[in-house]
Image (cartoon, grey):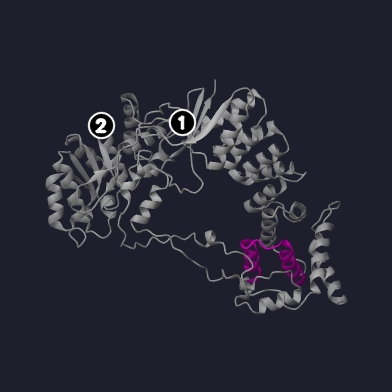
Amino acid sequence: MMTLLLSFCRSLQMLWKNRLYPGSSPRNWTFSVLYSYFHFSKKEQRYFSFTLPFQRNTKATNFLISQAISSNKNDKDTSRQESSFSPHPLFSAGTAKKKSELLGYKKDQQHYFPFSRPELLPTKPLSSEEWEKVKENFEQKNIFENWMMKQMIKYNCSIDIAKSLLSWIARKNNGIVEYKLLIGYLTLCVSQRQTAEIIDVYEIMKTRYKTLEREGYTLLIRGLIHSDRWRETLILLEDIKKVMSPSKKNYGDCIKGALLHREMNLAWNLYFEMLNHRIIPNWETFQAFFDFAKGVKNNEFERRLLDILLYLRNNQMYPNEPFAQSIKMWFESIPEKKWKGESVLIHKSGQCLACGRMLESIHLNSEEYEFLKQRVLKDVLDGGDQYRKTTPKEINRFEKFIKNCPPFDIVIDGLNVTKMFPKIRESETLLDVVSQLTKQNFQVLVLGRKHMLNGSSRWQKNEMTAVQNMAYCFFADNVSEDDAFLLYATLHSGNQCRFLTRDLMRDHKACLPDEKTQHLFFRWQQGHQLVFLNYYPGKKIIFQSVLTYDTVIQTTGDSWHIPYDENMVERYSYEVPTKWLCLQQQN
Ligand SMILES: [Zn+2]
């Protein structure tokens, strides 16, 4: 036992030797490693269990989503979606998820990686001999140490166990613990907020490495903000800037550190620096400002928080539920202003059910419409990056085609619409949709690809000929980006023209030059995109009604209406929330 302990101490000395600058005090760390080693080495032989020590993290194992289409589900309750509070299911939070389930897209329930079963994970710190034994039972010896650390992080092991692993590794590697393992250990310490340990690892890293990679900096910043050495996170932030641009997480953590230590100006300066670098803060960062300002009487601070809300408006961002709660509490905490907030739904007419005010309309006036049209058409014709799959020649051909057609009422993305019903032949769906719409005297344009005309089991020639006899059709090269054509044709036809696609053109929105145009685009899209309420082949097509009000943060001065995401509702990026926070000043 004595020799064992001596050699262990020697290896620890080697671990720290030459890596600590004079004056630093890694003693605690060394001591605690030693302590845990010594303390547990006397315990019984069986140090690890063969059962799961922690709850399996299903979220982490679930992240692979299978797109396999299983086909036997029918829309049973789509009619329920036509409630007066959620008038546009396509754009309402949670609809896409429901829809994809109805259409048979399933999340894969269980996807395990070959090594994700934690049978070998110890429940107590182990001695070196015990670690050797565990390793003997492990098949892929060369990845054992890193694998073990990963498991410990995944199952949030006690840091004493991780420390016993590091001690063993240091001992057999002449005191060297590789960077990746050190980072693993740091990850564990940060997630368990073990500040003293974090500071020790920080000292080791500072001495041993001139610069770190992003993960190292990120962990150290996150870990240090709670300590009295939080100001050093600003030095780390500067270090990051020398080689790359700091992430929103890095800035967010530094801001939180400053707020925690009541350095308000510093926090705001970091926030503005972030915005100047076009880094969008995450919710926790925004929320931190509101939380720390609660009950504080400071006009400057108040103005800045309202600016945050306007910034969110301009970027069409919707707070999550905890943040919405913080906003409400902050408003209600402002002395003498008598704000009252409540969570509400909006009637489909656009009226707030709490205060009776009408929300901003979604419809573009003619000036706004012209502005958007010119912007988007110019974008399509200029052929920015997003359209590089379309050749100028093809755009030219399309432009000429459009000029020779009357304005359309409905533009259909043929390929996309038919994909929605995997059990039905594509050309059959297309023909059914087109003939129903043309019977209602709509002027219809079908956009498609050349391959749809070649004749196949999915695209029958006679049905495609029938489609061409009823509607205007444009078939692009098989490699073309048809979104561009859809936008062009719809906008060119005028404000009455709608379009039918399941696709939501997020990329296009993102490519628009500024926030104003993006917001107009989103309003236009919500007001012009048609969605099937229900579709069975041969039965009458019914579209969902279109939203009349704009889902965006808005104010009248003495009121605020803030749409937010509810905790349990999964919203796709093109959907809008249905819950609102209504804030009114009581007079
Ligand atoms: Zn209201």
Residue 200 highlighted magenta (yes or no): no
* Kind of element beneath mark 2: loop
- Label 2 is placed on what type of residue? Gly
The amino acid type found where label 1 is placed reads Ala
- Give the distance between the C-alpha atoms of the residues marked 2 and 1, in whole angstroms: 36 Å
Quadrant where the N terminus is found in the figure: bottom right
Q: Position of residue 253 (x, y in %)?
A: 65, 43
Q: Which residues are magenta?
A: 144-173
- Residue 506, given in percent of the width and then of the height, sits at 39, 43
Which mark identifies residue 354?
1
Element type at mark 1 = loop
Mark 2 or mark 1: name the one nearer the start of the chain.
Answer: 1
Q: Tell me the tag on residue 219.
A: none
Q: Residue furthest right?
A: 2
Residue 66 x/y as whole percent = 41, 62
* Number of marks present in the image shown: 2
- Mark 1, ligand 1, within 8 Å: the answer is yes
Give the side of residue 304 with respect to residue 158, left or right. left
Q: Main secondary structure of the magenta part?
A: helix
Taking the spot 28% from the left edge, 54% from the top edge, the residue there is 419
Residue 454 seen from this side: yes
Is residue 160 covered in magenta?
Answer: yes
Quadrant of residue 52 within the rendered picture? bottom right
Residue indicated by mark 2:
494
- Mark 2 burial class by Cα count in 10 Å: few <14, some 14-19, many 20+: some
**Quick one: 80 or 375, which is closer to the camera?**
80
Residue 150 vs 532, above or below: the answer is below
